Image (spheres, grey):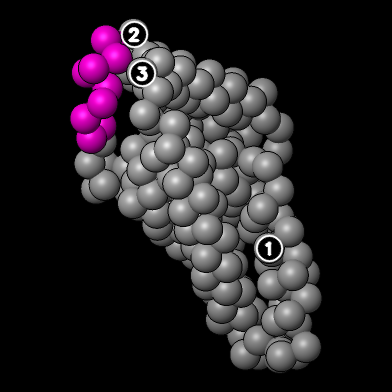
């Protein structure tokens, strides 16, 4: 069982880590601006769903295997980078479309939800972060370490979902106002392309 004295410090650190500029919140913001607030929330749900895999892996020790195996780490890393670069290419094609073609709803919420899951699961840095972060707030004398780490992971997911949701609402509101400008759709397509490509390249050079 998680000790009460640990919960608030854990949530405080988790919130700071979540709102710090990074691939996940930038991804949520980009989708919200491009596709609306509901799209940002769907993306946030996908990203947080992906955290279930990382929490389970950290609690069960699978992340330790990933950390110890250079081959496994590289395989997951390059798969994630390839997926991000593929999304960058799709976004680039959006930017080349005539402005009028981009004025309609662009992506299904289910598709964005799945993209959020895949992007999160295929980022080995998240697994390594969880295996390094969660145990710091677990106490072997307080009961099962697995149960504590799963509980902490769920808390992290909950606060991340709330903060990502707020980012989605804010970015979606800004995007809604900007969509009235004829050239904005093209700018969004190219901006998303650069963002996804930058995250993908960063992942390629990520070290354990």
Alpha-carbon distance for marks 1 and 2?
Answer: 37 Å
Q: Quadrant of residue 180?
A: top left
Local secondary structure at mark 3: loop
Residue under numbered circle 2? 96
Q: Quadrant of the C terminus?
A: top right
- Residue 14 in the magenta stretch? The answer is no
Residue under numbered circle 1? 15
Q: Is residue 195 above or below residue 166?
A: above
12 relative position to 119: left or right: right
173 or 127, which lies in front? 173
Q: Is residue 33 visible?
A: no
Q: Earlier in the sequence, mark 3 or mark 2?
A: 2
69 or 97, which lies in front? 97
160 or 98, which lies in front? 98
Q: Quadrant of residue 84?
A: top left
Residue at the location (23% across, 35% down)? Answer: 105
Residue at the location (59% across, 51% down)? Answer: 127
Q: Is residue 70 above or below residue 185?
A: below
187 relative position to 202: left or right: left
Of marks 3 and 2, the one in the foreground: 3
Of marks 1 and 2, the one in the foreground: 2
- Where is residue 182? Give x, y as percent: 36, 18
- Where is residue 139? Give x, y as percent: 75, 82
Local secondary structure at mark 2: helix
Q: Which residues are magenta?
A: 97-106
Q: Earlier in the sequence, mark 1 or mark 2?
A: 1
Of marks 3 and 1, the one in the foreground: 3
Q: Residues within 10 Å of mark 2 (few under 14, many from 20)?
A: some
Q: Residues within 10 Å of mark 3 (few under 14, many from 20)?
A: few
Residue under numbered circle 3? 182
């Amino acid at each position: 069982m998680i000790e009460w004295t640990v919960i608030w410090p854990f949530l405080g650190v988790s919130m700071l880590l979540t709102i710090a500029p990074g691939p996940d919140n930038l991804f949520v913001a980009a989708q919200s601006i491009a596709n609306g607030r509901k799209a940002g929330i769907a993306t946030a749900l996908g990203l947080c769903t992906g955290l279930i895999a990382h929490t389970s892996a950290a609690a069960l020790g699978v992340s330790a295997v990933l950390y110890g195996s250079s081959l496994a780490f590289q395989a997951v890393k390059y798969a994630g980078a390839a997926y991000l670069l593929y999304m960058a290419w799709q976004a680039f094609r959006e930017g080349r479309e005539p402005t009028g073609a981009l004025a309609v709803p662009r992506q299904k919420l289910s598709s964005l939800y799945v993209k959020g899951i895949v992007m999160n699961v295929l980022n080995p840095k998240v697994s390594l972060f969880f295996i390094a972060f969660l145990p710091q707030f677990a106490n072997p004398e307080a009961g099962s370490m697995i149960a504590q780490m799963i509980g902490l992971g769920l808390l992290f997911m909950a606060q991340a979902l709330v903060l990502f949701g707020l980012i989605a609402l804010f970015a979606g509101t800004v995007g809604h106002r900007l969509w009235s400008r004829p050239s904005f759709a093209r700018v969004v397509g190219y901006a998303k392309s650069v963002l996804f490509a930058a995250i993908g390249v960063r992942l390629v050079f990520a070290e354990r």
